[in-house]
Image: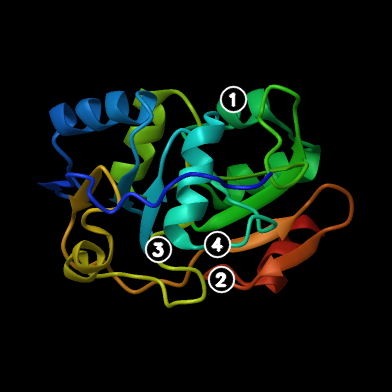
């Protein structure tokens, strides 16, 4: 698809402080509702800050590509709250189930075939993870939809771990920023394509050798 809409730099961004390990559930409920209403939120994850929205809403996903200045041919992964939700939108084979049970919640993203109820945007796949960050996990659980999990940065630029830097770069471009302060510097998640053969898509915190050894 092609993204055609005017650049809006005048969004009134709401900045909300949040505890990443023990978030106020009233805030989580509010943000989950906002996500379902089509709002775009920057939120903490177990790696870096993420750029989140309802992944089932094509308009939201298009906006996220635009905000990131990201090529439309590149994939956007999602966070789900459970294997059950992942199975609703993706075809989860036995190896994928084993990896979910072993390494999730955590910084591992699995690429599987998508089901027809998950919108085909730039690819035919469904890339998901279950986050070990309480904020990200609870948002996905309460929203009950896959939430986009692409890193909150301009395409090609480094991942962001500082709320100060997130606010500097994205205030006026997104609806809400959840300020969890400075995050621990963890590389973005390891990405594995597991549709047929097991292939490494992106190196991350979980070594590929550890994954292949576990499956053997």
Give the foreground label among 1 and 3.
3
| Coloring scheme used | rainbow
Q: Secondary structure at mark 4?
A: loop
Q: Which residue is mark 2?
A: 204
Q: Is residue 89 above or below residue 130?
A: above
Q: Are marks 4 and 1 in contact (CB under 8 Å)?
A: no
Q: Which mark is residue 128?
A: none
Cα–Cα gap, marks 1 and 2: 25 Å
Q: Which residue is mark 3?
A: 47
Displayed quadrant of residue 152? bottom left
Viewer-proximal residue among 134 and 202: 202
Q: Are marks 2 and 3 in contact (CB under 8 Å)?
A: yes
Count neighbours of disc 4 (C-alpha within 10 A) and say few if under 14, some if 14 to 19, many if 20 or more.
Answer: some
* Residue 201 x %, y %: 71, 66
Q: Is residue 216 above or below residue 133?
A: below
Q: Which residue is mark 1?
A: 84
Which badge, 4 or 1, is on the more N-terminal residue? 4
* Residue 157 x %, y %: 45, 77
Q: Residue at x 16, y 33 (%)?
A: 27
Q: Secondary structure at mark 3?
A: loop
Give the foreground label among 4 and 1.
4
Cα–Cα gap, marks 1 and 3: 23 Å
Please indicate, yes or no, whether residue 213 appears anywhere in the rendered image: no
Viewer-proximal residue among 205 and 169: 169
Which badge, 2 or 3, is on the more N-terminal residue? 3
Q: Which residue is mark 4?
A: 70
């Amino acid at each position: 698809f092609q993204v055609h809409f005017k650049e809006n730099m005048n969004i009134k961004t709401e900045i909300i402080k949040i505890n990443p390990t023990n978030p106020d559930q009233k805030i989580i409920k509010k943000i989950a509702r906002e996500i379902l209403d089509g709002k775009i939120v920057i939120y903490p994850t177990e790696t870096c800050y993420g750029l989140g929205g309802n992944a089932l809403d094509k308009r939201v996903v298009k906006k996220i590509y635009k905000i990131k200045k990201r090529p439309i041919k590149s994939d956007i992964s999602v966070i789900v709250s459970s294997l059950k939700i992942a199975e609703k939108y993706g075809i989860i084979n036995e190896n994928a189930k084993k990896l979910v049970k072993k390494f999730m919640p955590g910084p591992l993203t699995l690429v599987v075939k998508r089901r027809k109820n998950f919108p085909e945007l730039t690819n035919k796949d469904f890339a998901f993870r279950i986050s070990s960050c309480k904020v990200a996990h609870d948002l996905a659980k309460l929203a009950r939809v896959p939430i986009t999990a692409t890193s909150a940065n301009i395409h090609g630029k480094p991942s962001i771990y500082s709320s100060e830097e997130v606010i500097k770069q994205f205030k006026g471009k997104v609806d809400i920023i959840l300020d969890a302060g400075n995050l621990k510097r963890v590389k973005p998640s390891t990405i594995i394509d597991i549709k047929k053969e097991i292939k490494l898509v992106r190196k991350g915190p979980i070594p590929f050798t550890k994954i292949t050894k576990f499956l053997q």
